[in-house]
Image (cartoon, rainbow, N blue to C red):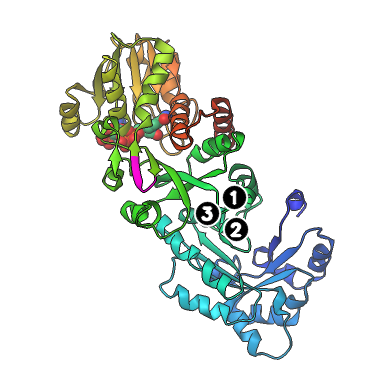
Amino acid sequence: MRGAGKHDGLFEIRLDCWAPDALKNLDPLRALLGACQQPTIVTFRAAAEGGRCDADYETRLRFWRDEGLELPAKFVDLELDIAEQLIHGAGSVDWSRVICSYHNQVEVPADLKQIFERLAATPARVLKVAVRVNDAVDCLQIFDLLEPAKRAGREIIAIGMGAAGVTTRILGPARGAFLTYASLGDRHATAAGQISIEELTDVYRVEKISSETVITGLVGRPVGHSISPQIHNAAFSSSQTDAVYIPFEVRDLKAFFKRMVHPRTREIDWRLRGLSITAPHKTAVLAELDWIEPAAQEIGAVNTVVVEDNRLCGYNTDASAFVEVLKNRLGSLGNARIAIIGAGGAASAALFSLKQENASAIIFVRDMKKAKQFADRWAIESRDLEHAVFAEFDVVVNATPLGTSGELENETPAHARQLRGARLAYELVYNPPVTQFLLEAQAAGCETLAGLPMLLTQAAQQFQLWTGRTANSDVMQAAAIKALNSDI
Ligand code: NDP
């Protein structure tokens, strides 16, 4: 509570997170609540609804009946089954202090509307629904609860739990929700997908979001690791643009574009302006667009969508960013000999842009048979990565995920002995900022180029496409470095 003191808002105290013994004598809790400067919510979550202790229904009911309802908190949060029991029981309940809640840790239940009606049938001042969302498109069902609650003159909290539900946490208040939840740092998150109060206020600026705020975001799966929200939101904030950038964890891309993105078919009223697209959707997204720039068409991948009136337009800012960063370092690429390790989306973007510069490129792959189609398509030579020697190349590009933080962090597609003699090692992985590939290159005496400049350059191009203005690249870089450092 001391840590929370610098923030405005309501503070939720989860008694199910307390040691069971602490509940035998509530005097310390009463003293704590009395001393708290901020208004509080007290709750005692059932294990079946995400609670951290296994107190059964009878124990919880007894707790509320005997002492819980009298605690000096602004609100008490009672599960629907407890509230329904209290309605019919003896004794009076001050329903103006009650949040009546329903949680589902697994899914959005098919009977969500009926559950909402049961909540609405209680006299509780605030109704709360928090259900697990497994695909971003399920957030529609959460937002759909806000309107009926408003019509019934009720306050409502509607949360989609899990990474795919983050949208509801960020946009909920602007769309009429009574409140949203945040943790006091990741360690203290009490529900899946809950983001920290710092992130919610400093990165997403949730208090400034209104129905007029322009929406942008990142579509992929997973998206939780991405630093693009930090980069783009910092750029919006510094340029005083009323826009927010949200991570959308999308499983069913078609459904997401139909129901939430395309202006002609979407079921949500919002000022959506643009999207970044990342793995695994960069190719599949082509089928959802009305117009695709020729470069993106040739590459076969779109990483940027712009909503222009009723049309969706696709671009690829990876390709131009890849070559812009390289030219900034080497100048002209006219006679450069480039080795690209990998034959995926990033390699395609690199090859396309190198072709425009008349540079010569060769790909190095782990599976020659699998890569044949790719090599034929780009009319380039492919070589086996296992026996590769890069001495003859000006630039060696890591266009594989090897080295990315997590399981692959200690891996590299090439070692120092292979890289010796090459001029420059160009890493596309940006997290961590210094990868094993870059360390091997340094040991081999090569110059190095890390992945962050390309990420920032493509992000700046996206900002330009969405806003028509030039991004503040220093602000974007500072936000990216801060995010990467806090990740370590
Ligand atoms: P893809 O999945 O499309 O392609 C990955 C390629 O790496 C495939 O050819 C794959 O080969 C190969 N690969 C994977 N594991 C290994 C391995 N153990 N040994 C050899 N080759 C391997 O990914 P992308 O092309 O989209 O992305 C590649 C990397 O580039 C990612 O880390 C991504 O984050 C980064 N990137 C960075 C950007 C930036 O702005 N800095 C922009 C875009 C991408 P196979 O087909 O055999 O599996």
Q: What amino acid is at disc 3? A: Gly
- Does the residue at mark 2 contact the one at mark 1 (Cβ under 8 Å)? yes
Dot 3: what SS? loop
The span from disc 1 to disc 3 (Cα, nearest Å) is 20 Å
Dot 1: what SS? loop
Q: Position of residue 41 (x, y in %)?
A: 70, 66
- Which residue of the protein is positioned furthest toward the front in this rendering? 309
Dot 2: what SS? helix
The residue to which callout 1 is attached is 209
Q: Nearer the viewer, residue 18 or 213?
A: 213
Does residue 312 show up magenta in the picture?
Answer: yes
> From the viewer's perspective, is the residue at label 3 or at label 2 nearer?
2
Ligand 1 is found in the corner quadrant, namely: top left
Q: Which residues are drawn in magenta?
A: 309-313
The residue to which callout 3 is attached is 193
For the point 72% across and 74% down, the residue is 97
